[in-house]
Image: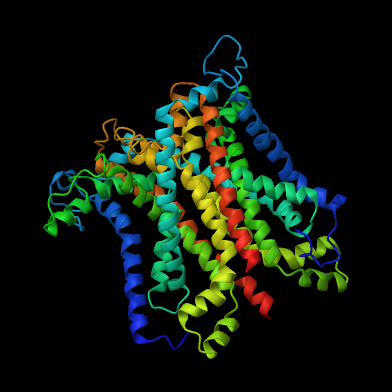
């Protein structure tokens, strides 16, 4: 914050021109985002319900006290964390590998770039439908391949108690990986090639060049994208809604599915808002720990 | 980089092949399923290439659900949301990147915090507000939500792109006597164009693909967007009619793929890198 700006133009207070630039976005943000978020937090302390005739009342922390003992919610929360970590980490590793490959002068690179667009461009609902076709016990290619290889008859992946969550996680990885790869590739292409060449002349091998030249330049993007991925994955909804709708037996019921049903199937707006608050609080703490840790490492370097 | 050994190169190609297969096979299977007649879909030994390809799944899909109406709804919502979001986000992102004021700090903080908010905490109050405004089950209501929802990421991306434009270029223009607005339009904007395109693209695709808000806000089939209508193909038992399901899903993906294919070159063109080097 302090010394990065050496330019004479930076100043503490915005002038009129700057306000003119800011207002078109600031007003919608305040009215339709900040406002509703505060409203949402307030709702968590009320008994707000859909289709009620008597007025909504403040009930203090009752929703939260109920929530603490709601084992179904905490099961769902645990599944959400498992899913978010299980998707984000492999997603990042695979994306980094793909980005590094795409940065090389390989034949067929164009094809990989074109294919990488597919999962990103595809509506999540279509991704879910597509993988349901892949996982389909009879007409699906996965079980057919397993049968062809003589590895048994395959199974019904999405309804098996043990296989549903892993199967869904693989879809999550597939869906988000290219987007991460493209972001990382953009970062790679901004790293100075002169440095690479200089390091190569100095005899640094590929591994060393990666850690001394590429990674430092890539790190801010890597940090940002992995943090965002984690949040997005934790808040995922459509993929799992289409693939399993939370089944079998709640094994893939992510917290968002849980809160959605509470709010829009059972109409418990206040209780669902309390769930949202708990999700925000936990995710914020996890993220703060992650980012502060990484930024500290950055400074010490 | 020219000295990469043959072994390493072979390894790279092997890895690339792995990625190609992983990325492509579900999509190829979707296409394959879309063109298979019901008889083949019922058989226990499905093949990659349909033995008796047919278009009947597509006809059936259009007959079963209002796909064209849904596509039109999706297009309107996504276009409006993308254009509005980028138009209002770009100036603010510029200020956030260039002025170190308290407002910029607050805006950056809000961008980060809003990403951590689960949509459910946003959608419940928005649902109540839009209901009071009579905007439930309307595309305008959905566009409003989409604009606000894509703003944080648009600001985040655009502010990054602005920071990547060297101040020196703007200062040089100022030294040459160009006014502030002139500098913005003739120096900064062209350098930002790929970033703005990328951001608009992102906003369009995310709105086109969006499911959760549309599911909550749009109640009647003639108002619903494509992703919501697609889920109607999934039967209650999950024993969906696979052929029409695949056909409709395949069609819904084509516009997104086309948009990406058209603009991808502009994003990755490295226009910025070129401008700075020269």
Q: Residue at x 45, y 60 (%)?
A: A92
Is residue B68 among the parts visible in the rendering?
Answer: no
Q: Residue at x 45, y 27 (%)?
A: B220
Q: Would you place residue B15 above or below residue B207 in this image?
A: below
Q: Quadrant of the N terminus of chain A?
A: bottom right
> Which residue is more in the foreground, B255 or A15?
A15
Q: Quadrant of the C terminus of chain A?
A: bottom right
Residue A171 place in picture, x, y as percent = 36, 50
Colour mapping used in the image = rainbow
Q: Residue furthest front?
A: A300
> Which residue is more in the foreground, B145 or A260?
A260
Residue B258 place in picture, x, y as percent = 45, 57
Q: Residue at x 58, y 43 (%)?
A: A284
Q: Would you place residue A90 above or below residue A47 in this image?
A: below
Is residue B161 among the parts visible in the rendering?
Answer: yes
Residue B259 place in picture, x, y as percent = 49, 57
* Left or right for B113, reference B245: right
């Amino acid at each position: 914050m302090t010394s990065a700006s050496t330019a004479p133009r930076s100043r503490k207070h915005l002038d009129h021109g700057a306000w003119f630039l800011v207002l078109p976005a600031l007003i919608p943000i305040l009215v339709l985002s900040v406002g509703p978020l505060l409203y949402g937090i307030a709702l968590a302390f009320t008994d707000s319900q859909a289709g009620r005739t008597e007025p909504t009342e403040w009930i203090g922390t009752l929703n939260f006290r109920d929530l603490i003992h709601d084992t179904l919610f905490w099961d769902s929360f645990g599944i959400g964390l498992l899913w978010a970590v299980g998707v984000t980490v492999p997603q990042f590793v695979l994306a980094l590998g793909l980005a590094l490959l795409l940065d090389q002068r390989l034949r067929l690179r164009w094809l990989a770039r074109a294919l990488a667009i597919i999962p990103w461009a595809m509506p999540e609902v279509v991704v879910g439908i597509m993988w349901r076709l892949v996982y389909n016990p009879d007409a699906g290619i996965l079980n057919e391949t397993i049968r062809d290889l003589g590895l048994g008859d395959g199974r019904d992946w999405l309804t098996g108690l043990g296989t549903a969550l892993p199967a869904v996680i693989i879809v999550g990885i597939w869906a988000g990986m290219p987007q991460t790869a493209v972001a990382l590739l953009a970062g790679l292409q901004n790293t100075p090639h002169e440095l690479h060449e200089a390091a190569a002349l100095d005899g640094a091998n590929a591994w060393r060049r990666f850690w001394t030249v590429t990674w430092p330049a890539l790190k801010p993007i890597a940090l940002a994208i992995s943090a965002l991925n984690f949040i997005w994955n934790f808040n995922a909804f459509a993929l799992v809604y289409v693939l399993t709708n939370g089944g079998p037996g709640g094994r893939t019921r992510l917290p968002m599915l849980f809160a959605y049903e509470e709010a829009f199937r059972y109409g418990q707006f206040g209780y669902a808002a309390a769930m949202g608050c708990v999700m925000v609080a936990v995710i914020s703490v996890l993220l703060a720990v992650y980012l502060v840790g990484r930024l500290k490492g950055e400074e010490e370097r | 980089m020219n000295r990469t050994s043959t072994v390493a190169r072979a390894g790279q190609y092997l890895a690339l092949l792995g990625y190609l297969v992983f990325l492509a096979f579900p999509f190829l299977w979707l296409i394959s399923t879309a063109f298979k007649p019901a008889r083949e879909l019922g058989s226990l030994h499905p093949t990659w290439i349909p033995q008796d390809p047919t278009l009947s799944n597509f006809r059936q899909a259009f007959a079963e659900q209002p796909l064209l109406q849904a596509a039109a709804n999706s297009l309107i919502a996504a276009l409006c949301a993308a254009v509005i979001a980028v138009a209002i986000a770009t100036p603010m992102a510029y200020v956030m990147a260039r002025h170190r004021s308290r407002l910029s700090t607050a805006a950056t903080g809000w961008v980060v915090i809003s990403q951590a908010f689960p949509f459910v905490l946003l959608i419940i109050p928005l649902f109540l507000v839009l209901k009071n405004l009579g905007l439930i089950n309307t595309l305008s209501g959905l566009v409003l939500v989409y604009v606000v929802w894509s703003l944080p990421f648009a600001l985040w991306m655009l502010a990054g792109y602005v920071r990547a434009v060297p101040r020196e270029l703007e200062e040089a223009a100022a030294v040459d006597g160009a006014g502030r607005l002139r500098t913005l339009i003739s120096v900064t904007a062209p350098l930002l164009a790929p970033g703005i395109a990328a951001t608009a693209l992102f906003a369009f695709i995310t709105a086109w693909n969006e499911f959760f808000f549309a599911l909550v806000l749009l109640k009647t089939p003639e108002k619903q967007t494509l992703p919501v209508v697609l889920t109607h193909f999934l039967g209650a038992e999950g024993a969906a009619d696979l052929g029409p399901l695949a056909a409709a899903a395949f069609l819904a993906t084509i516009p997104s793929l086309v948009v990406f294919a058209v603009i991808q070159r502009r994003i990755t063109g490295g226009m910025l890198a070129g401008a700075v080097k020269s």
